[in-house]
Image: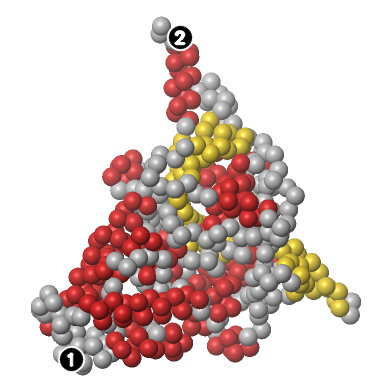
Amino acid sequence: MRQPLSRELSNLLERGRDRQLRLAVTGLSQAGKTAFLTSLVNQLRHAGVEARLDLLPAAREGRLLGAQRLNQPDMGVPRFPYDPGMVALRDTPPRWPEPTRGISELRLQLRYRPARSGWLTPEIAHLTLDLFDYPGEWLLDLPLLQHDFYSWSQAQALHEGEQRRGLFSEWLAAVEQLDPAGEADEAQLAALAEEYAQGLRRAKKAGFSDLQPGRFLLPGELEGAPVLQFFPLPQLDASQHNTSRETLEALPANSLYATLAARFRYYQQQVVKPFYRDHFRRFDRQIVLVDVLGALNAGPERFEDLSRALRQLMHSFDYGQRSLLTRLFAPKIDRLAIAATKADHVTPDQHGHLVQLLEALLAEPLKDLRFANVPVKALSLAAIRATEAREVVHEGKRSPALRGTTLEGEEVLVYPGDVPARLPAAEFWQQQGFDFPGFRPMPTSSEALDHIRMDAAIDWLIGDKLT
């Protein structure tokens, strides 16, 4: 039986108010992607009940009714481990969720009341939010798409500071003796590739960020495959071995150079490009998480290393305003947030400096984004709080401090230090007047996780879809 016209129109309008948004949470290893996604799901699921989301108008006005998890569209991709993450945070003592070791996704359906009422506006509307998580190590590979093997080798040589070279000393000593025109030795290639991978792992542990190829750090199903048995040749310049580009590209297929170049191309085409195509080309919104404090702790060479990695990474994404044609044929990210994470690891009076330093760190990409008229917002946040702000009184003077439990289990009351409001000069590093320790997550009896400015981040990323 045909439905009455009014019911058909109501159903049509209801479907018309259903919206879908794909959100990319981007960040290098240890930037806090898993914590951010866990908190994001938690805040939305408890919106209107226990979650503190005052900076999100739909929640503040009581229009956001909550969120439920839906079955994800791709049954071949694991679900984001939200429940295990919450178990870790509720443990005694609380633990941080396990870091990402593979691709996962989660689909949420948000229900809300539209801000405007009228006969064409449904009483309840929906927003389907698709969230994606992936290892930060794999993200490092996206800039490889801008290179061939020759230019990549030269770029890696340019980035070698004194401390970084020290972590690769044995590999460098061996690879500098190689003749690019010599015949490739499979056993030697495998051994040198493993030594290079060990150097990357040492560099990651030491706080470096610009580490390629990223799959060498977290190989997944590619463990032991020939596609991961290559490395750059830092000696590629015209003064050694007659290694001009033209000469090298004319070498036979069994030469060392040709073998490494072939494996680099295969890695680009069969590993990096599908990852980019399948997981990044279709995003609507993006937030880039940056561990600025960790880079400050690690020193000047590592801080510059992070800056370079982020600049390269930002150029890998396609930003621009959506239109019907671009949405159908060339999807683009049309709104971006950049966030300095772990804001609770410094006192509240330093949060403004933290944002200013983040903007200085990404100054060139931000100029390009604003020139392209892409809305972008910088903020500092703590997805899951680990400290409480306190004051210390000494000789009648009040000073800010933080109270928390370190990762080693020690309860402390500390002032971690000042955050520079601009890119640090040489004297800043010489003074070394700061120490930003790591903390455990705070215990909580509430179902909703405590945070700093997650509501501001949510509002920027999806708030306009909840009107």
Disc 1 marks a residue whose amino acid type is His
The answer, for residue 246, to whether it is visible in the render is no
Q: How many marks?
A: 2
| Residue at (52, 83) in percent of width and height | 300
Which one is closest to the eye, mark 1 or mark 2? 1
Q: Position of residue 121 (x, y in %)?
A: 52, 25
**Element under disc 1:** loop
Q: Position of residue 6 (x, y in %)?
A: 48, 13
> Of residues 40 and 127, which is closer to you in this image?
40
Task: Answer with left or right where residue 341 lies relative to residue 192.
Answer: right
| Residue at (64, 65) in percent of width and height | 343
Q: Is residue 214 above or below residue 457?
A: below
Q: Position of residue 308 (x, y in %)?
A: 42, 74
Disc 2 marks a residue whose amino acid type is Pro
Q: Quadrant of the C terminus?
A: top right
> Which of the 4 quarters of the picture holds residue 405?
bottom right
Q: Is residue 71 above or below residue 295?
A: above
User: Callout 1 environment at 10 Å: few (<14), some (14 to 19), or many (20+)?
Assistant: some
Mark 1 or mark 2: whose residue is earlier in sequence: 2
Q: Quadrant of the N terminus?
A: top left
Between the residue at mark 1 and the residue at mark 2, the CA separation in whole angstroms equals 83 Å
Q: Position of residue 427 (x, y in %)?
A: 59, 89
**Element under disc 2:** loop
Give the residue number, with chain letter if any, for mark 2: 4
| Residue at (46, 79) in percent of width and height | 202
> Of residues 80 and 9, which is closer to you in this image?
80
| Residue at (27, 64) in percent of width and height | 268
Give the residue number, with chain letter if any, for mark 1: 241
Residue at the front extreme? 187
- Which numbered disc covers residue 302? none
Residue at the bottom extreme? 239
